[in-house]
Image (spheres, grey):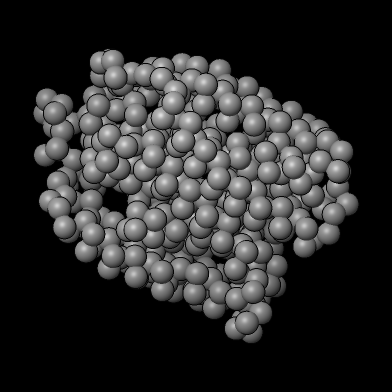
Amino acid sequence: MALVLLALNLRAPLTSVAPLLKPLRDDLRIGDTAVGVLTSLPLVCLGLFAFVAPRLGRRHATRTLLTVSLAVLAAGGLLRAGTSPVAVFAGTVLVAAPIGIANVLVPGLIKRRFPRSVPRVSALYSGALTAGAAAGPAVAVPLAEATGSPWRIPLLLLVVPLALVTAVVVLIALGRQRDEAAPDASPVPGGRPPALWRNALAWQVTVFFGAQALLSYTVFGWLPTIWQDRGLSQASAGLSLSLCNAVGVLGAWLLAVSERRLPDQRVAGGAVACLTAVGLTGVVAGPRSLLWPSNMVLGLGLGAGFALALSLFALRSPDAPTTAALSAMGQGIGYLIGVLGPLAAGALHDVTDGWTWPLAALLLACSVQITVAFAVGRSRVISGEPR
């Protein structure tokens, strides 16, 4: 339960902003450039603060770090509901920074607490992440209508109460067992993970996660616009993104079921990239009669792909400290790659006035992911020992 609650805190505070951007922009009187910075800032923070997490994890227990992160998240939610642009931007940083740290800590926690069930528990965790990502934009507008507040109260309610409740639950749940800091639990000589920046397998995991982040956040940023450009209503366009995220939960579950029957992750890695490519092609270039089915295929591919990318941090590591270090490297670089996706797609769309070239770029990312999947999917670990 603590893991699910934690996952729900790590996406909804970020995805709930998109449907409230217009009233937020009008109220604060900021331009489109500032709005672009505001929407890109969380991804940059996820990448940068991922590199901070391993150092903190070597000095403090995971229980302490997660609890403090949730408290900072709640404080950021309060500040983000402020009345000035400075407060909103500073609050956004305080919301995204602890999420970036928690993103890195959780795979190591799963490796340490559930060493025999990494794919299943990772799928549960990533499914909850996807559910939170879907719930944020779906609930934000109804909350605005119910409270009479265009954006402040909805953003506050979607962050602060759940973060505080989860902090208490995490504190209690992780306090039941001794939660060791990474060096104490590591069999690696010297208590530190092996050097990853010169390790080919570590880079393969990083490239796979980076391609997944690029695909996912480009879809999250532009899918409703693509639907509207194809002649559908604003309501249908908004529903398309919520449905895509909701089906992603099913994709994570299907991955967990299939991995029990497969000797390694090569087939799964190729399959999720192919599903994403087919879904993207159908949404952008397929007949309108296949828009909804294509959207569901796209959601399956993205949901299962994200679950697989997260589970690889633990599956390719011999111990929890290496998992944390690999998670930091993969997510730190991966989310910074992910920032480029929405920006490049928007630039290509502006230049060509269409979605054919953005689609070609995304299909190229899918092909990279398929290629890497057959290397990173082999059953081995960073130390070189066979699993």
Q: Identify the image quadrant of residue 343.
A: top right
Residue 140 in view in this figure: yes
Q: Which of 385 and 361 lies nearest the eye of the viewer? A: 385
Please state the horizontal and vertical placement of residue 194, each as a whole percent of the image: 24, 24
Please state the horizontal and vertical placement of residue 276, each as a whole percent of the image: 64, 33
Please state the horizontal and vertical placement of residue 25, each as a whole percent of the image: 67, 68
Q: Residue at x 35, y 54 (%)?
A: 3
**View extreme (bottom): residue:** 148
193 with respect to 255 (left or right): left
User: Where's the C terminus, which quadrant?
Assistant: top left
User: Where's the N terminus, which quadrant?
Assistant: bottom left
Q: Residue at x 38, y 70 (%)?
A: 75
Please state the horizontal and vertical placement of residue 247, each as a whole percent of the image: 61, 47
Would you place residue 144 above or below residue 335 in this image?
Answer: below
Q: Which of 304 and 329 lies nearest the eye of the viewer? A: 304
Q: Residue at x 44, y 26 (%)?
A: 261
Residue 42 in view in this figure: no
89 with respect to 186 (left or right): right
Count of number-bearing discs: 0
Would you place residue 259 above or below residue 166 in this image?
Answer: above
